[in-house]
Image (spheres, helix red, strand yellow):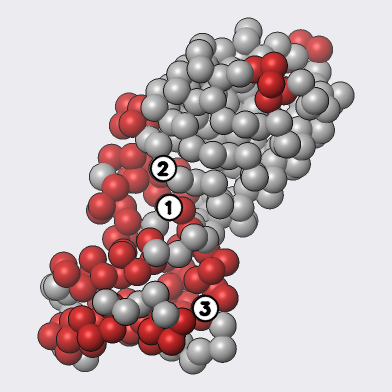
Amino acid sequence: MTVAALKAKLDANFINYKSKTKKAALVTLLVETIEARSNIPRLNEDVQGYIVSFLSGFDSLHAVSQLARGFRLRAKPKLDSMLKRSDADIKVAAKAWCEDVEAAREIYGPISIWNTSEVTSMEGLFSAADEDVGPAAKQFNEDISKLDVSNVTTMEGMFSKASVFSSDLSSWDVSNVTTMRAMFWKASAFNGDLSSWDVSNVTNISRMFKDATSFDLEASTYHWDLSSVMEENDDFLY
């Protein structure tokens, strides 16, 4: 299929994409477009923009999967691969996102629907203090509320020095996390409600909220079960 043909099909359907029928058609077109990228050296940028806009219209990865279910999608594995993150590539993807959102979105898909279900480490992931991510993370403030963090065991320094970050993390399942050391260190804009977090397996909370000047420490942590925290690592601020 040529670029012109793809764009014509997308133009014909995209304007009405909110209806379920049109969305189903667009999923198929999306997959065809992804499939075509490997065969067309210079895929028209407008077509790539449609892919990004379409995926960004979903609230979660689950919503994409639900819509795709029941349809014969030849290149669905390519779509899955585009969104799936692992311990091996998630920090590379996060660094790319912090440095150039538009370029990263074309390669990795919208960050709000990344499949992180198999990721076990998010150490320094959006940290301006992490040498693998760099200072660009200071401006990170994307909606990552729907990420699946249920298998993550370390969030050490995850948002340290991410000075404008203020996304809602209240629904995260952090029950398998064991270290949150310096997680929000110098994340000066963050004041999310974390009161429902299950931190019963966390052993290290040292400096977790050090210099997180906007955070209401008492309101969010008053009912936390900190029974697993080791005495030498039990101070949120030091």
Mark pair 2, 3: CA separation? 24 Å
The answer to whether 163 is drawn above or below residue 112 in the figure is above
Binning the other alpha carbons within 10 Å of mark 3 as few (below 14), some (14 to 19) or many (20 upward) gives some
Nearest the eye: 221 or 108: 221
Q: Residue at x 30, y 70 (%)?
A: 51
Mark closest to the chain's N terminus, 1 or 2? 1
Q: Residue at x 56, y 13 (%)?
A: 210
- Residue 38: tell me if it is visible: no
Which residue lies most toward the top here?
238
Q: As shown in the figure, which amino acid type bears the numbered disc 2?
A: Glu
Q: Badge 2 is on which residue? A: 142
Q: Residue at x 49, y 91 (%)?
A: 72
Q: As shown in the figure, which amino acid type bears the numbered disc 3?
A: Leu
Q: Badge 3 is on which residue? A: 67
Image quarter where the N terminus lies is: bottom left
Instruction: Tell me, yes or no, whether the two marked residues, 1 and 2, touch with CB atoms within 8 Å.
Output: yes
- Residue 83 position, x and y percent, is 45, 63
Nearest the eye: 220 or 140: 220
The answer to whether 122 is drawn above or below residue 192 in the figure is below
- Residue 143: tell me if it is visible: yes
- Residue 230 position, x and y percent, is 81, 18
Label 2 secondary element:
loop
- Residue 179 has which mark? none
Q: Badge 1 is on which residue? A: 111
